[in-house]
Image (cartoon, helix red, strand yellow):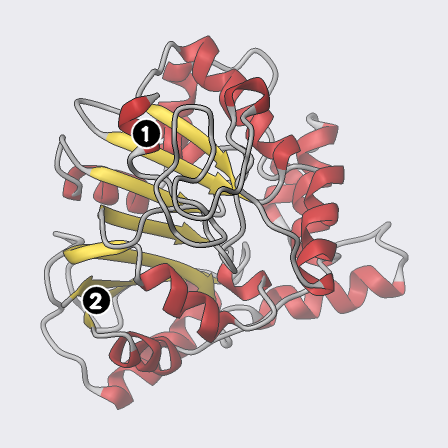
Amino acid sequence: MDEFRELLACPACTGALAPDWSCGSCGARFDAPDGIPNLRLPADGRTDAVRRFYERAPFPGYPPRDNLQALHARAERSVFARLIHSAIPGDARIVEIGCGTGQMCLYLARADRVVIGADLTRAALLLGAAAARRFGLSQVQFVETDLGQPGLQAGVFDVVYSSGVLHHTPNPRQSFARLAQLARPGGVIVLGVYNAFARVPLRLRRVVARMSGFRFIPFDPVLRDRSSEPARREAWLRDQYQHPEEHRHTLREIQGWFAENEVEYLRAYPSAVLGDEEEPLFAPAADNWRPEGWLAQLGWMGALGHEGGLFFTIGRRS
């Protein structure tokens, strides 16, 4: 636990935490029920509404009788998952912000990597911690904390990964500023948010879903694939169609956040350069021409819209 504790911090004052989870600087005391440190301070009403939303249906769920090999195989159906695994060094210190049930944390927990999975929903973290124990993964630590006042050390992580999270916060721009501070100088930030263009198909499906009282949702391949797994199907339906807080963003907007926080833009995934190769993931793209980026995003309506319209922007902290 000591190697994980040095990556954590008091959420009230950012001080170091003692083995009994007390803060040596301000004296605040915390605990770690079920082996998951509770470093979450009271939040605003909108953030707490999101926490309660995921307490009811933690996302994403685990299939019945899951195992580590099945999790790896499931993740590696995604080209992006394979690319990010190959791009991260074997001794990296990784934090996933908004890890949910921790499936990406468990996928990346290989070689000598140390992985922290942070989320504000304890129900989801309990599922992730239980899976880590079943799979025999000791280099993953889950922690309950909120990005508003994160219980994480600033400037120490080689990779800061966050997928599908910031667009559910009250102010995504401010949330990114706090997230960026977690990366060490030279560390990589991988940010996944809903794209304003690629989200259009799902928003149209959501109109039909609301009109039918969510009894009919057309053309959603994830719901179709999960028809035999009611819990995972319900988690996807709630996350994509009934979420209490949602924002959508353009690539140019995210590039602006990067510039404001001294993060060098490297590339987008899918690529915003037409005809560009997708790898290596942490290498700069061949170009960053704004008109080409807008054209690429229009194309994402077809490439990404059949699911949720999520795209990634990758940068390196200066």
Q: For the point 17% across and 22% down, which residue is it?
A: 111
Return the residue at label 1.
4
Location of residue 194 in the rendering, given as x and y in whole percent from the top left corner: 50, 65
Location of residue 71 in the rendering, given as x and y in whole percent from the top left corner: 42, 23
Please tell me whether residue 243 is drawn above or below residue 17 in the rendered image. Answer: below
Return the residue at label 2.
267
75 or 296, nearer to the observer: 75
Q: Secondary structure at mark 1?
A: helix
Label 2 is placed on what type of residue? Arg
Q: For the point 54% across and 51% down, which residue is it?
A: 146
Label 1 is placed on what type of residue? Phe
Q: On the image, which quarter does residue 79 sit in?
A: top left
Q: For the point 36% across and 75% down, which residue is it?
A: 254
Is residue 25 something that shows in the picture? yes
What is the quadrant of the N terminus in the image? top left
59 or 76, nearer to the observer: 59
Please tell me whether residue 185 is drawn above or below residue 72 in the rendered image. Answer: below
Horizontal side of residue 125 vs 74, given as left or right: right
Location of residue 116 in the rendering, given as x and y in whole percent from the top left corner: 37, 35
Name the mark on residue 198. none
